[in-house]
Image (spheres, coloured by chain):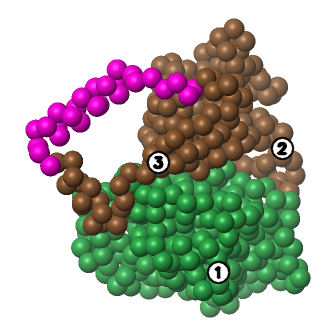
Chain colours: A brown, B green
Amino acid sequence: MNEFSDVKLTRRDLLIAGALSVSTAAVPGAHAQPAANQAAAGNPEPVTTGVTFTVNGKQVTLQLDTRTTLLDALREHLHLTGSKKGCDQGQCGACTIIMDGRRINSCLSLAVMHDGADITTIEGLGTPDKLHPMQAAFIKHDGYQCGYCTPGQICSSVSVLEEIRQGIPSHVTGDITARPLLSVDEIKERMSGNICRCGAYSNIIDAIAEVGGVKA
Amino acid sequence: MKAFTYQRATSPAQAAQLVARTPNARFIAGGTNLLDLMKLEIETPGALVDVNGLGFDKIEETADGGLRIGALVRNTDLAADARVRKDYAVLSRALLAGASTQLRNKATTSGNLLQRTRCPYFYDTAQKCNKRAPGSGCAAIGGYTRHHAVVGASEACIAVHPSDMAIAMRLLDAEVETVKADGSMRSIPIADFHRLPGNSPHIETVLEPGELITSVKLPKPLGGVHAYRKVRDRASYAFALVSVATVILPDGSGRVAVGGVAHKPWRVEAAEQQMAQGAKAVAERLMAGARTTEDNAFKVALVHRTLAEAMAAAQKGTS
């Protein structure tokens, strides 16, 4: 039922655990000291909370440190590493996922706040054997170079077409009371929350325009 | 990030009591600003009270012909609401000029008002900042001040309020409706909601500890031509250098509020009496007493020119 519940220790986890035990051994009592400092500042010992949500059609239940972002829950706990950590502060869009039909920055959201949510990541949009039309269009138009921002770009691109379909206006929509129409200007404005360090923007626009049925 | 306890609020009064009586507790709604600051340990709450389950997600018409916007209405939904687009276009325009779609999908009406008034020195924990560490000094004064306040600032702080939405709310004379820990409710005119920095720039609003925003009320529509002009360093997803919100009525009278220039949304009602004399007269009154640096003196001229353009467009009937 829950294929993600079997969380294995990765090599990285082991390295982190090893580093912690070394520092504890080297400085006796060091473990207690930061906790005392935290209490003085009004912060408790780390707290865990349960959360259940659906990721790519599968319900998962996790017990998480309250500080865990949705992005870290997806990547480190569910091992869905398609969503990327770029800036970790909502600037770059590499972590973009679709939650309850809306795209969000998963880095700026606590996992425990999404009990009952329906989450789609790049892994849920398509598979190598059965690509989402937007994934196929990115490949056709060479909408990437290094590929790091691509999962976020594609989740955003799919959402852009859905937002236009729903009639949600944008900063460049001419008549604010009318239904917005898909255009290159609309695509550019609506994709401004996704940065591509390689500068594949023109090809990304070509891919979105093709799937959206407009001329780039 | 410092550790914190996490609780989902079950009622507005319970949420207010919980935050009022728990030391170092904060409400969280969208979290797009708070979490960012928590990662940098600029904000270090020991307890978070999640208000997302409290409802407050509707936009309803009021008896006097206005709108009551639930505190948890997301920025995307507020900007896309047909009534807002038709009767309060300046608010839709302002919202859509702010942040990215990903952030607007998460950010709430109340959270937008409560985002921190900030500057790059506030974000840099190696710098002195009276807002982050009261009494430590202000590294921005005498530093690089291109983005900083030119009116209403103090010797303690020259940061600007970053919200676009709040500029339109100020223009429209919105009221912020709250519930306090003792269960009492009040309505705060938006003009009084945000504070100028004075000697306590770390206190940014008049909200009391535990006081929870439940809704924002808009008076009945003003009519006229609505516009929101935002001038920034790139075409999208950047803070304003200067923004100008206007409503111009058919008789030539109107309202003006300005962003990017002060610690709070900047509106001077007396300046609006000068509308018949033209944009220059209005802007001069609006920006009277401006204290600028070599880096940000351009903002005063930019307010003049942006307002002139918005007023000229309104006379032609376009926004």
Q: Residue furthest top?
A: A129
The chain that hosts pointer 3 is: A
**In this picture, which residue range is highlighted in magenta?**
A4-29
Give the residue type at disc 2. Gln
Q: CA distance from mark 2 to mark 1?
A: 34 Å
Taking the image as drawn, is residue B55 in sight? yes
Q: CA distance from mark 3 to mark 1?
A: 30 Å
* Residue in the image at 79% along x and 55% along y: B80
Image position, residue B225 (x, y; %): 80, 70
Q: Which mark is residue A166?
A: 2
Q: CA distance from mark 3 to mark 2?
A: 38 Å
* Residue in the image at 72% along x and 29% along y: A57
Tell me: residue B102, above or below residue A195. below
Image position, residue B31 (x, y; %): 55, 56
| Number of numbered discs overlaid on the protein picture | 3
Q: Image quarter for residue B248?
A: bottom right
Give the residue type at disc 3. Thr
Dot in front, 3 or 1: 3
